Image (cartoon, rainbow, N blue to C red):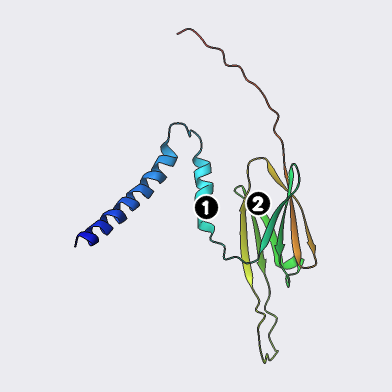
C-alpha cells in the first residue's frame, strides 16, 4: 500500500513538474517575445517523422548548409519543396503505376513522405538539386551586421 501510494505521488509530482516547466517557459520575465520560439519547439516535437527518408545535414562553409535526402525511386515531379512558417517542408508522393501488372512478389511499395526542418531566422533556401537518387537542398545564413545602440537616460 505504501509503495503504491509512493508511486502515485511520484507520478503526480512528475506531471505537475512537466506542466510547471511548460508554463514557466512562456511566462518567464527574461523571455519576452520568445512565444514564437516556444511554438517552433512544440511544432518540431509534434512533427514525429518516422525516419523516412533518411537525411544528412552538413555545413558546407561558414554560412552555408546542405540537407541531403535519400529519395531513390522518386522523380523530380514527385517531390515538392516549400517554406511554410519558418519551416522547410519537403514532400514526396510516388504514383502507383502497378495497374494492369501482376506481381509475384511486391517488395517495393509506392511511398509518400513529408519531412520538415525548422529554419532559424536569417536562413534562406537556395537551390535544390536531384542527383543519383539524392535530393540536395542548399541553405545560406545571412550574417547580420553588428549594430551597437546607445539608449539615453532621461530624468524622471
Q: Quadrant of residue 137?
A: bottom right
- Can you tell which quarter of the image residue 53 is in? bottom right
Provide the secondary structure element on which disc 1 rests.
helix
Q: Please give the name of the residue rendered at 68% of the width and 27% of the height, measured from the top-left corner.
A: 146
Q: Label 2: which residue?
A: 83
Residue projecting furthest to the top:
155
Q: Which residue is mark 1?
A: 43
Residue 96 coordinates in the image, percent (x, y): 67, 79
* Quadrant of the image containing the C terminus: top left
Give me the C-alpha separation between circle 2 and circle 1: 15 Å
Query: Which one is earlier in the sequence, the residue at label 2 or at label 1?
Result: 1
Q: Residue at (49%, 40%) from the top-left corner?
A: 35
x and y percent of residue 116 in the render? 61, 56
Q: Residues within 10 Å of mark 1 (few under 14, many from 20)?
A: some
Locate the N terminus and report the quarter of the image it occupies.
bottom left
Could you tell me which residue is drawn at 66 percent across and 64 percent down? 54
Amino acid at each position: 500500500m505504501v509503495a503504491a501510494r509512493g508511486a502515485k505521488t511520484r507520478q503526480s509530482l512528475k506531471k505537475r513538474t512537466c506542466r510547471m516547466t511548460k508554463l514557466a517557459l512562456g511566462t518567464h520575465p527574461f523571455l519576452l517575445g520568445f512565444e514564437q520560439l516556444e511554438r517552433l519547439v512544440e511544432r518540431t516535437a509534434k512533427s514525429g517523422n518516422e525516419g523516412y527518408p533518411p537525411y544528412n545535414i552538413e555545413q558546407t562553409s561558414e554560412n552555408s548548409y546542405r540537407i541531403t535526402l535519400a529519395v531513390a525511386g522518386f522523380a523530380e515531379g514527385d517531390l515538392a519543396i516549400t517554406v511554410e512558417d519558418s519551416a522547410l517542408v519537403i514532400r514526396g508522393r510516388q504514383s502507383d503505376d502497378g495497374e494492369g501488372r501482376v506481381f509475384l512478389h511486391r517488395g517495393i511499395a509506392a511511398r509518400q513522405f513529408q519531412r520538415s526542418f525548422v529554419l532559424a531566422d536569417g536562413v534562406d533556401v537556395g537551390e535544390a538539386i536531384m542527383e543519383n537518387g539524392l535530393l540536395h537542398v542548399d541553405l545560406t545564413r545571412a550574417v547580420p551586421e553588428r549594430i551597437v545602440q546607445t539608449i539615453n537616460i532621461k530624468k524622471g
